[in-house]
Every structure is written in C-alpha cells, then in structure tokens.
Image (cartoon, helix red, strand yellow):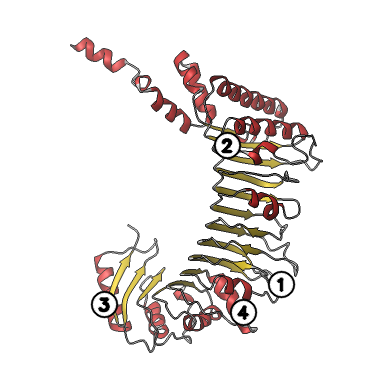
Amino acid sequence: MESKKLEMGSRDLISCLPREVLVEILSLLPTKLAASTSLLSKKWRYLFALVHSLDFDDTVLLQPPPEEGREELKESFRNFVDRRLALQCGCGSRIKKFSLTYLVTNNSDVVDERRWISSVVERGVLEVDVTLRPRWLGPVHTDEVHGNCFLPYHLFRSKTLVKLRLGTDTNVGKLPPDVFLPALKSLFLDTIMFDDQDLSDVLLPGCPMLEELTVVHKTDFYPNYRISSQTIKKLTVFYCYDFGIDDGSRISFDAPSVVSLNYTDYALYEYPLVNLGSLVKAKLDISYSKTNIKRPDLSGLLVGISNVETLHLSPDSTDLISRCVKHGLVLPVFNNLVTLSFGSKNKRGWKLLPYLLKHSPKLETLIIQGLDSYTGDVTIGLFQVKELHVVGYKGTAKELQHLKSLLAGTECIPKMQVEFPEDVVVDDAKMIQTRRDLFILVGVVSTDVAYFE
C-alpha cells in the first residue's frame, strides 16, 4: 500500500490532464515559454502545435537595445516566429489570437510582418493585435499585392477577424480600396495615421458589423478625423496633445447608433457634424488649450449629445464650457438627462452648475467631485434632484460648510451618498458622525457611506 502511494505521489499529474485542458493552459502562457515545454517529451511537442494563441514580442530580446549582436538577435527572433508558425500550419490547428510586437527598421522588417500576419489571416484567425514600432522613415516597399500599405492586404480582407488592434505611432500608408471585414466587431487604433480620409472613407465602411471603436492618438500631429459609421455602439476617442491643434482642427462624429461615448481631447475650433441620435451615456474630458485656440466653438458638440441620459463632465470640461458660456455659448436643453456627474476645480467651473441644472428638467441624480475647490458664492437652490452623490468626501468642517452653502434654499435631499477617498480611514464612529452631520447641517434624510476597506 505504501509503495502505491509513493508511486502516485511521484507521477507527473499535470501530464495526466486531458489534452484539451493542457492546450488551454499553454495558450495562456507567453509563446516563448509555451514553446519551451516542447522539450519535455514527444507528447508536449505535439501539444504546443495545437496552441491557439500566439504572442510574439521582440522587446524581450531588444529592450534595452544591446550594444552588440542586435542583428543576430533580430534574426533569431525572425527564425523563432517562422518556426512556430510553420509548426502550427503543419498540424492544421486554427489560431484564435495572434499578437505581434515588432521593431521595424527597414523594408525587410516590413516584408516579415506582412508575411506573418498574412499567414495567420489565411488560417482564419479571430483576433489580431499588432504593435509595430517604426524606427525608419524610408519608403515602404511597393508590390502588386500590398501596394505601399505598411500592413498586408490580406489583413483588410479577412472573413473571420472579430477583433483588431493596431499600434503604435505608425503611418500605415494607403489602404487597399476594397477593404472588407465582414465579421469585425471591435477595432482599436493606437496612434495610427492614414492617408487622406481612409479611416472614414475606406476602413470604417468596410466593417459592416463593427460595434466598438477606439481611436487613441499620442503624438503632436493632430489628424482631422471624421468618424462615420452606422453600426458602432461604443465609441472612445482619446487625444492627449495640443501641439498640433490650430484653427483648422476639427473632428466630426457621424455615428447614429452610438450608445456610449468617451471623448478626451483639447477643445477644437469647431465640431461641424455630431450625429449621435442614439446616445445614452457620454463622458467628456476636454481641456482648454491656452496657446492654440482662444475661442473654441463647442455648440455643435453639446447640441449633438443633448439627448444623453447619463453625462460625466470632468473638471477640465466644466472649466472649458464655463469659459465658452462667458463668451456667448448657449447651452442646449438636456431633455433626457437623468444622471449628471459634475467635477470642478475652480470658481469658474462651479458657476456652470446652476445653469446646467436649469437645462436638465428630468435630472434625478447629481454626482459632484472637487467639493474642496468650492468657493461659496454659487448655490443650487431648489431643484428636482432625488439623489446627491459626493465623490472624494473627507468629512471635514470645511466640506460641510461648502455643502451647506451649495445647497442653500434646498429644504431637503431625500437621499445622499458620500464616497470617501482611499486614504481616509472609515470606521463605525466615522459613519455615524457623517450621517448625523449631514442630517443636522444639510437636511439629508438618508445617507449611504461608501469607502475602501
């Protein structure tokens, strides 16, 4: 009996797992680590050939850049990718996800990445994540198949691709005119430049099932994008530089099916077209550019989102809108707005709040943050809000006084929630005191206390 227990204890229990389970485990590992298991035995060699997720990252070899032997390391990486793809192709297994991070320094590198991406697309890949890091400004090799596009033609004609992520800081060149991705539902573009209006005129029209689009731009070149799609439901646009912004900078949203919008940017000269007729939730984080555009026109943007039900305005956004109101901007009426999240960092921002509430006749929940920056000369007065949430509340006497001044003229708040920041210790005594203070000084009937444990 003891010998049997000893025998069981020394067995390789992992190898005894079903083949399907082992393949799933290997697919979750970095490809280089998963490939090393093929040295264990003949069984493991065949298992790796069935892995459905491949992740190739040359930064493992090239970061930090070696002083000597760089080309040898790149050649080693190329051979590794070629062998792995050949192995998968030889066993006929389908690749569900393909990730590639690759430093492009010459035309030979372009040929490599085109070949690798084409290989997985031809085998019915579902998800592609490509991060190219160009360190070369020469002309892209042009051929009959790919033209002068940085990426392979086959990528833009995939019948199986569901999710596509492209980056970073890359001018992809001229897209093929017949882009058609009939299964694509999610597209993420990280600092990708297109020729002319290829994003709106070529790529997006070729994605008839697209539901989620993310456009991130992290360089000082500002492209005048026109985002046009009849199918997108979730849209995220993130620009973080104002260096390239001038009086010609514009962006348009022609996306009548969008339900959720997350827009981060510097204020532009104008928003000529904002067609977001199905919008339910919007988050705006728009900053004022002190040097480039003195009088941005937000009217098109605000009118275009005025049917929203939930609106989040960052402190930078409220400061910007307040500046524009001072120079003649008339706020639209937000007839469907039920929940408003309002952040402010200065007196100018707080002055916008009463004006915004008057233009929100159906508002029920108000969320405020930045109470410590309240200046005391802005009051909400009587209003229809049923719930008031205060984010970043610390329970100081100063904050209580600010709340009392802000709510002057309001007889009673039916329900209030305060959310303490992570660095504040909240115990039972703190919660009891908070509820007592809010009831006595502000007239809150019911208070929920949220905190980090």
Report the side of 179 relative to 233 (left or right): right
Instruction: Find residue 73 and report its image quarter.
Output: top right
Residue 16 % position (x, y): 35, 19
**Is there CB contact under 8 Å for labels 1 and 4?**
no
Q: Which circle, 3 or 1, is nearer the viewer?
A: 1
Amino acid bearing label 4: Arg
Q: Which circle, 1 or 2, is nearer the viewer?
A: 2
Quote the CA–CA distance across marks 1 and 2: 40 Å
**Is there CB contact under 8 Å for labels 2 and 4?**
no
Quote the CA–CA distance across marks 3 and 1: 48 Å
Q: How many marks?
A: 4
Report the side of 356 relative to 401 (left or right): right
Q: Is residue 195 visible?
A: yes
Q: Counting residues from the N terminus, which is met first, the one under dot 2 or under dot 4? A: 2
Q: Which mark is residue 436?
A: 3
Q: Secondary structure at mark 1?
A: loop
Q: Counting residues from the N terminus, which is met first, the one under dot 2 or under dot 3? A: 2
Provide the residue designation for mark 2. Answer: 99
